[in-house]
Amino acid sequence: MELRPGCKQSDVGVIPANWEVSPIGALITDFRGGASLKPSDFTGSGVKVLPKGAVGRKGWLNIEDSDRQYCSRDFSAAHWRNQVDETFTIVVLRDLVPSGPNIGLMVQIRDPEIFVLAQGVYGFKVNTGTAPGYLVQLSKTRWYRKLANSIMVGSTQVHITNTAFKRAQIPLPPLAEQETIADALSDVDALIESQEQLIAKKRCLKQGAMQELLTGKKRLANFSGNWETRHLGDIAPLQRGFDLPTSSLQQGPYPVVYSNGVLNHHVAFRVNGPGVVTGRSGTIGKVTFVEQNFWPHNTSLWVISFGGNDPKFVFYLFTQIGLERFATGSGVPTLNRNDVHTFKVNIPPLRAEQTAIVGFLSDMDNEIAALQAKLAKARQVKQGMMQELLTGRIRLVQTEP
């Protein structure tokens, strides 16, 4: 294969002529592993422990509230070789998941704070010729993921040995280009993060609107009068879905709705749309609204009659109630249909008010969907940029002819 002008063949593929190939270990000046923390070493406050779950694809350390743990300051001081701060780059080299989805991923620490590394998590500093942000971005590429998978060992607790990690060969542009690549990709990451935060905010606003509008705490303009208290079974009775005949398992225009939503399509349908479907067993609480004719699978329950109520209002009502509260069984949970039917709710007697509420919430759904589409586009752009910048196909720093 003919090389592009200004490129060379290397051990890591085709790269620009002025790029180098280096083992990761040659870039590292300080390398620290996790502490052997016993259950008794964890405390209610003190120094934060840095868990594996805090390392993901966002590029920055992110400890969820549910993963927040601490050790005592005495323990931290005694294990100073397991401490890291914002000057370290963090990498996961051990995972309990056989596929090791986070193994090899790297992140940086945003805030000036000391952490004690948990087992399986490592921190390292790099020399002055290496930009940590470049390594973080490189660790999210498909090329690097293949590299990480190729040096993983183990079956249940998969891991990459320290030696294998340090020997791994990576492409290394000049420092100025590393920094430019890292800054460009980090800007897109910031855009993606802001979009994710906006979507989360919009979802919270929608949840609040559902809580108010679907209980009558807040009324839309032009509507008055008392709401009715009725059993859900009188509003929207549920029925178990149907077995799917194996003789007709073909792709077709009608969705087959399982307990966890629409998964595939079928050449025939059993129920006229629109419809509301929820999980009977397995996935409990997920509610799906189906516009067209469909086939409710036997793992689901479907509304057989809306009793003159707006079908999408029923969908929002079921979503707001949280049908998982009616699950029973200690093994595979099953939705107790009788408990659903006897549950009492307040609803507007006028379908016009129901439809107005549906319109308000649908507008919010459409806004969230539009934001999600922008987020998906931004993620696609990021993937394209990574592919081009981290292989040297596109250069952001002017090179000598």
Image: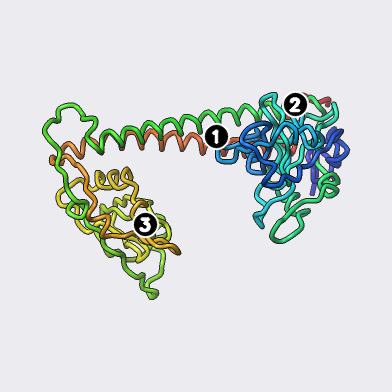
Q: Where is residue 53 in the image (x, y as percent from the top left)?
A: 63, 43
Q: Position of residue 84 (x, y in %)?
A: 76, 32
Within 10 angstroms of label 3, few (less than 14), some, or many (20 or more) residues? many
Dot 1 lies on which element? Answer: helix
Which marked residue is nearer to the observer: mark 3 or mark 1?
3
The spot of residue 96 in percent (x, y) is 67, 54
For the residue pair 112 and 98, the one nearer the viewer reads as 112
Looking at the image, the residue that sits furthest to the bottom is 247
**Is the residue marked by circle 2 packed among few (<14), some (14-19), or many (20+) residues within 10 Å?**
some
Near-viewer residue (171 or 78): 78
Q: In this view, does 33 lie to the left or right of 96?
A: right
| Residue drawn at point x = 82 percent, y = 36 percent | 81
Q: Which amino acid does label 3 sit on?
A: Ala
Q: What residue type is labelled 1?
A: Ala
Instruction: Please say whether residue 5 is visible from this viewpoint.
Output: no
**327 with respect to 144 (left or right):** left
Asked whether 6 or 292 is in front, the reply is 292
Real-space Cα separation, disc 3 to disc 1, in angstroms: 38 Å
Q: Closer to the camera: disc 3 or disc 2?
A: 3
Question: On the image, numbered disc 2 is attached to which residue?
Answer: 179
Q: Three-letter amino acid code at disc 2?
A: Glu
Q: How far apart are marks 2 and 1 (CA)?
A: 21 Å
Tell me what residue is drawn at x 76 percent, y 42 percent.
Answer: 34
Q: Which numbered dot is residue 327?
A: 3
**What colouring style does the render use?**
rainbow
Q: Residue furthest left?
A: 225
Mark number, residue 378:
1
As helix, strand or loop, the secondary structure at mark 2 comes to helix
Label 1: few (<14), some (14–19) or many (≥20) C-alpha neighbours in 10 Å: some
Q: Marks 1 and 3: in contact by CB < 8 Å?
A: no
